[in-house]
Amino acid sequence: GAGVSQTPSNKVTEKGKYVELRCDPISGHTALYWYRQSLGQGPEFLIYFQGTGAADDSGLPNDRFFAVRPEGSVSTLKIQRTERGDSAVYLCASRPAATRTHEQYFGPGTRLTVT
Amino acid sequence: QKEVEQNSGPLSVPEGAIASLNCTYSDRGSQSFFWYRQYSGKSPELIMFIYSNGDKEDGRFTAQLNKASQYVSLLIRDSQPSDSATYLCAVNPSGGYNKLIFGAGTRLAVHP
């Protein structure tokens, strides 16, 4: 079946602008995660959705970052007043509803460059 | 101390050899452990997971977990040049299944 999809694959924006990154999880996966990966580092957790609600947003770096998942499927990560330090690959992952081992499956990512 | 630690490498092994990748974690209550492979410019791909002490084998891959030592490893037998990638260790911390904590990854280079 189809995997996690993310759009756009690349986004270049100017400092101070607003961006939206979209994630479409694997069909039937109720859990959705956003991570951010900088060069040479592992992915860093941002936020976790179970269904429509954000169950854990402890990884969001500040209030410029916000994410929604209004219908429990597609999610949008929103970044206001972008800064050069926001440049990274933003990864989305999803997980089935009931697995003992809680493995997550990643999408291809969106590479964000803030100039 | 980082929550999940890995040697950055590169780990260089000849084709056909066994590659051994290691990872330590700090949260003693961690519950599940994962190995992801990441090719340059690509997203992480799940290759193994383990949650019980001992060994788990899947084809050429074996994951080993020792919770007492807070240590997890990945062995790749009969290494191939196509195995050359960064291998990320990830851990479900205690307190729930809401996130994975990743190490920085070990770069593996398999040379012919």
Image: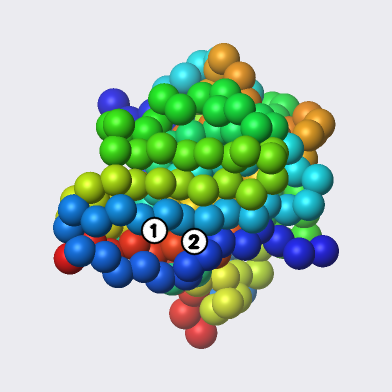
Quarter of the view holding residue A71: top right
Label 2 vs 1, first from the N-terminus: 1
* Image x and y of residue A114, in percent: 23, 61
Secondary structure beneath label 1: strand
Residue B87 visible in the picture: no
Q: Residue at x 40, y 70 (%)?
A: A10
Using the image, tell me which numbered label, if any, was put on residue A63. none
Residue A115 visible in the picture: yes
- Against A97, residue B58 (above or below) is below
Residue type, numbered disc 2: Gly
Q: Residue at x 20, y 64 (%)?
A: A14
- Against A57, residue B8 (above or below) is below
- Against A84, residue B34 (above or below) is above
Residue type, numbered disc 1: Val
* Image x and y of residue B37, in percent: 55, 59
Circle 1 sits on which residue? A89
Secondary structure beneath label 2: loop
Q: Nearer the viewer, residue B89 or B24?
A: B89
* Chain of the residue displaying label 2: A
Circle 2 sits on which residue? A109
